[in-house]
Image (cartoon, rainbow, N blue to C red):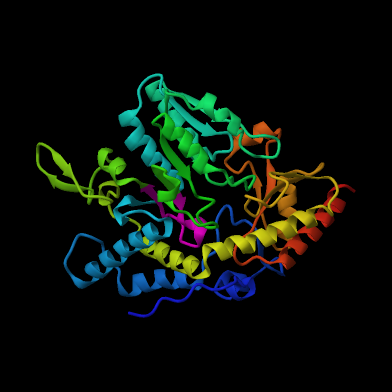
Amino acid sequence: MAAKPEVCKELNPTQVRKDFPIFERTIHGKPLIYLDNAATTQRPRQVIDCLKNFYEHMNANVHRAVHTLSYEASCAYEEAHKKVAKFIGAKSWREVVFTRNATESMNVVAYAWGLQHLQPDDEIVVTIMEHHSDIVPWFMLRKMKNISVKFIDVDDQGHLRLDQLKTLITLKTKLVGITHASNVLGTINPVEEIIAQAKKVGAVTLIDAAQSAPHIPIDVQKLGCDFLAVSGHKMLAPTGIGFLYGRKEMLEAMNPFLHGGDMINTVTTESATFNELPWKFEAGTPSIADGIALGVAIDYLTNLGLENIYQHEQKLLEYALDKFEELDGVQLYGPHSAVNRLAVLSFNLEGVHPHDVASHLDSEGIAVRSGHHCAQPLMHRLGMDNTARASCYIYNTEDEIDALVEALKRAQKLFRR
């Protein structure tokens, strides 16, 4: 077995970019500057080659045959679960359920746990900064089970109002859902403190780690959470693959979300028994190649080192916050400092619609997001409907931040004529 590569001592974005074929292209005749990483990241050659290798050399269904291709595919697919488990500090790889994305992971909790355990007058507590994926499923259960959904507010800088915890989390609270990091504000939330408060009343905890897992180290055992949801496409893996971590005793006590092939142990004309974890929750033919490629993406991130990734992004964020001070008539949302914040910059130019900002930036080869970012309750709380958003990752540089700021200056002149 080949020796594992050592974790790099310092992240070099210029070197990292060489692994990403997409940066070889131009947009409107200009080099691509990709600053939409909170929506989805780009894929390194290692992940792309993994997909190619699977379909050229290993393509077969898993857990359904004894022939060589199926055996190899099954082993690689299970190995990917083990990589995820190690990546997040789970006790066992059987606590890792592959899903399509974080949205599906949270719906698994809502359907497989919520329908089974929630009763009328029970309460769900989430934060106002949640992605819709951690709001809408609970509205569904509110309608079906007559429960209540309560929201923890934020202050004007985008920090959670922790003073509300003791009044909102009560003996009626059955689940607390928290985003580890906001996809709008970049705020990294003190989830350990919130989990501890939830435990005092016996509430289950669900962490949305879609934004945090690609950027900062996570240890689910240290966090003490019951569930954690992640999307692979935000951490270099293909689209259509994500995972749900669930404590073993929780998953074992839950009913399956989907029913059919591979999630069963036995089926008769009278009844069925369910498969062992995690296959109990992975009904049908899974996204095999994408799951294996998720493992390769984790290898890539592990080699870079999550601490190195976070430090690189901190430097970019500090630099960007300073550069944005050069801009007049710009409203920047989120914490005023880079402490406990990801390199996510949501902003509005005075008098210019975010879509116009994004369109102008695209004309200069710069990709950013514009819209409500699937966080409309937070938008309304902050007094607007949409923002432009630039979000950084491992391949972004200070030169690209400079290009963004200069392009925004030109946008201001263009739209204010």
Residue 51 lies, in percent from the top left, at 40, 68
On the image, the x and y values in percent for residue 138 come to: 45, 31
Residue at 39% of width from left, 59% of height from top?
Answer: 84
In this rendering, would 12 be left or right of 415?
left
Residue 303 higher or lower than 385, as above or below: below
The answer to which quarter of the image holds residue 363 is bottom right
Residue in view at x 38 percent, y 24 percent:
144
Task: Please indicate whether residue 237 sits to the left or right of residue 93 in the image.
Answer: right
Residue 137 shows in this picture = no
Q: Is residue 240 magenta?
A: yes
What is the residue that sits farthest to the bottom in this orientation? 2
Q: Is residue 105 above or below residue 13?
A: above
Magenta part of the protein: which range? 230-245
Looking at this view, name the residue that lies furthest to the left.
Answer: 269
Residue 61 appears in view: yes
Q: Position of residue 337 (x, y in %)?
A: 71, 49
Q: Position of residue 401 (x, y in %)?
A: 73, 62
Give me the residue at 50% from left, 54% from top: 213
Q: Is residue 178 magenta?
A: no
Tell me: 27 left or right of 206: right
Q: Quadrant of the N terminus?
A: bottom left
The residue at 9%/42% (across/down) is 268
